[in-house]
Image (cartoon, rainbow, N blue to C red):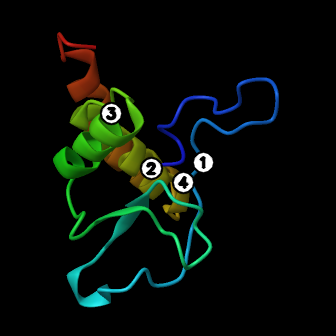
Amino acid sequence: FRDLIPPSDYGDGAKVAEVVASECLGQCGRGPNVAVGGKGDGDDVGRLFFGVEDFNTAAAILEVSCDVDAPPSLLRAADAIAKAGRASSPKKKVEILTPVIDALSSDPTL
């Protein structure tokens, strides 16, 4: 999510959106969970979304809750970039990134 939220400062220090990692939000057995809104201090986590396991769900949360248009193909690309960053060899990085680049290149909506 962090890489998909646009710059989040109005210029006066007020946050438009901020992505932070947290401990368990409760309902851990239904996770991975995402909280949107609230103060994030444990008492006020905002609206909870449970079972966020796929790109379409993540894109929908960003669109509905944060007014961010994040096409699922871009979420897949962000995930692939993260995996490539953790890959142990240049060959593995190329194997991970090439199909994503091809898919994005041929996507008429981008």
- Inspect the image, locate mark 1, and give the three-letter code of the amino acid beneath it: Glu
Label 1: few (<14), some (14–19) or many (≥20) C-alpha neighbours in 10 Å: some
Label 4: few (<14), some (14–19) or many (≥20) C-alpha neighbours in 10 Å: some
Residue that numbered label 2 is attached to: 93
Disc 4 secondary structure class: helix
Image coordinates of residue 43 in percent, x first then y, are: 54, 78
Disc 2 secondary structure class: helix
Badge number at residue 74: 3
Label 4 vs 2, first from the N-terminus = 4
Label 1 vs 3, first from the N-terminus = 1
Image coordinates of residue 110 in percent, x first then y, are: 28, 14
Residue that numbered label 1 is attached to: 18
| In this picture, residue 101 sits left or right of residue 25 | left
Residue that numbered label 4 is attached to: 85
Q: Residue at x 71, y 31 (%)?
A: 9
Is there any visible trace of residue 98 in the rendered image? no
Which of pointers 4 and 2 indicates the residue nearer the eye? Answer: 4
- Separation of marks 1 and 3 at Cα, in angstroms: 19 Å
Q: Residue at x 37, y 86 (%)?
A: 26
